[in-house]
Amino acid sequence: DSGVTQTPKHLITATGQRVTLRCSPRSGDLSVYWYQQSLDQGLQFLIHYYNGEERAKGNILERFSAQQFPDLHSELNLSSLELGDSALYFCASSDPGGGNEQFFGPGTRLTVL
Amino acid sequence: EDQVTQSPEALRLQEGESSSLNCSYTVSGLRGLFWYRQDPGKGPEFLFTLYSAGEEKEKERLKATLTKKESFLHITAPKPEDSATYLCAVRGAGSYQLTFGKGTKLSVIP
């Protein structure tokens, strides 16, 4: 158990809908990263938040957005969903004063029908 | 742009048959090379971080090594419970996110 929690574990929805994925980092970690994993693309970085502020964006679609709250949990919002958005979504957290290691949560499996 | 290529894509070993997984990378200013293990439908589990050429790390039957262009994950006398996908990732200078390879799916047959 990495100490990173994600909810829900599974999400099934229809095209055009909007969903919110939630992540709680390990105790003491200030950074939260979101990654998307699909069968053909592997793990792709989406966005990084540090202590409530956006720090970096990867290949994140404009339909996707994220935020990190004062209690350091983070939410990833996906809107106008398409079939191709079906994937595993992981968040990871890291220690601000330690090494570079990122610890991953169990993921949310999103299925868009 | 940072790039990571892992080979082979899949590897089948008999229990006890040692082998190595390869991770080739290009990165601007390496700030860390990472190995993770991922079981189906689960999140990646951190294994090792390597920072500089010549560095080695070991954990049970796994040993990771690093050169200026490659990293190897050596698996000695594997057991069926070592079956998983092994992911390699790099962090470059000026960024905190990881760039991942597509992984090597290891199957260890009893």
Image (tube, coloured by chain):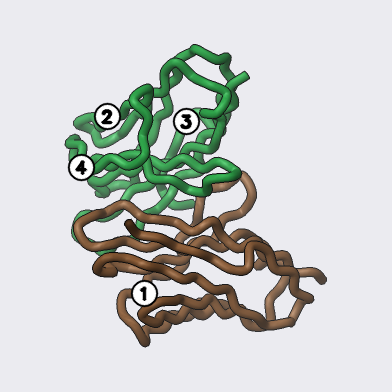
- On the same chain: label 4 and label 2? yes
The letter of the brown chain is B
Which residue carries the number 4 mark?
Answer: A55
Determine which quarter of the picture holds residue B85: bottom right
Q: Amino acid type of disc 1?
A: Leu
Q: Tell which circle, 3 or 2, labels the residue nearer the N-terminal end.
A: 3
Q: Is residue A90 above or below residue A85?
A: below
Question: Is residue B91 or residue A30 the one in the foreground?
Answer: B91
| Contact flag, marks 4 and 2 (Cβ < 8 Å) | no
Distance (Cα) linking label 3 and label 1: 31 Å
Which of the labelled discs sits on residue A7, or is there none? 3
Label 3 vs label 2, nearer the camera: 2
Task: Find numbered disc 4 in the image and state the secondary structure of the residue it sits on.
Answer: strand
Chain in green (letter): A
B13 to the left or right of A61: right
Horizontally, is B21 left or right of B56 in the view? right
Image mark 4: chain: A
Q: Find out whether the residues at labels 3 and 1 contact each other: C-beta distance under 8 Å.
A: no
Chain to which mark 2 belongs = A
- The one nearer the camera, A22 or A109, is A109
Residue at mark 3 shares a chain with residue at mark 4? yes
- Dot 3 and dot 2 residues touching (CB under 8 Å): no
Helix, strand or loop under label 1 = strand
Neighbor class of circle 2 (other Cα within 10 Å; few <14, some 14-19, many 20+) is some
Mark 2 — residue?
A: A67
Which label was assigned to residue B50? Answer: 1
